[in-house]
Image (tube, grey):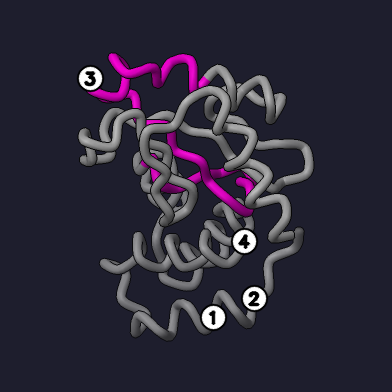
Amino acid sequence: METDRAKLDNTIAKYGNDRSLLLSMFQDIQREYRYLPKEAIKYVCEKLNIPVVKGYEMATFYKSLSLVPRGKHTIHVCMGTACHLKGAPGVLEAFERDLKVKRGGTTEDMLFTLESVNCLGACALAPLVRVDEKDFGKVNQTSVKNIIDEYKRGE
């Protein structure tokens, strides 16, 4: 996927060419492309007169930024204590099996990226799965297929 320099220019302008807002620019770019293309990092850094290595430092420091393409939907499986005790490891394994992708990976069709997180802050719903901004509580291995199918139907 090639980056659109006009869109990058608009993103830079949106933040008033303020170098201190580089993270916000990178987040906007990632929302557009579902990852942070290397060409975009280089272009934005050059436009803002920031060493490209500083752009890469930021891009690799923040876990929310990715240098590789991510799926249209991100599945977060909570592995916090309550979720872990109520079966989250099995839920994660079911997602890995059904999506044919390991934790941290993206499906071949670019529809899903699977992540585990330490806590989603809803222990009463354990085990909890968050897809994009929607929470699914008390998930079990059987309900994993239903969650995946819900998002596949929407495509």
The residue wearing badge 3 is 81
Amino acid under disc 4: Tyr
> Gap between marks 2 and 4, in whole Å?
13 Å
Task: Work out whether residue 154 or residue 39 is closer to the camera in this orientation and state it.
Answer: 154
Amino acid under disc 2: Arg
Residue 107: percent from the left, percent from the top?
70, 36
> Gap between marks 3 and 1, in whole Å?
44 Å
The residue wearing badge 2 is 5
Q: Is residue 19 left or right of residue 51?
A: left
The residue wearing badge 4 is 33
Q: Which mark is residue 129?
A: none
User: Does residue 127 sit above or below 154 in this rendering?
Assistant: above
**Dot 2: what SS?**
helix
Q: Which residues are magenta?
A: 63-92
Amino acid under disc 3: Thr
Residue 72: percent from the left, percent from the top?
63, 54
Task: Work out whether residue 9 or residue 155 is closer to the camera in this orientation and state it.
Answer: 155
Residue sitting at x 72%, y 46%: 110
The residue wearing badge 1 is 9
- In the rendered image, which quarter contains the C terminus? bottom right
**Dot 1: what SS?**
helix
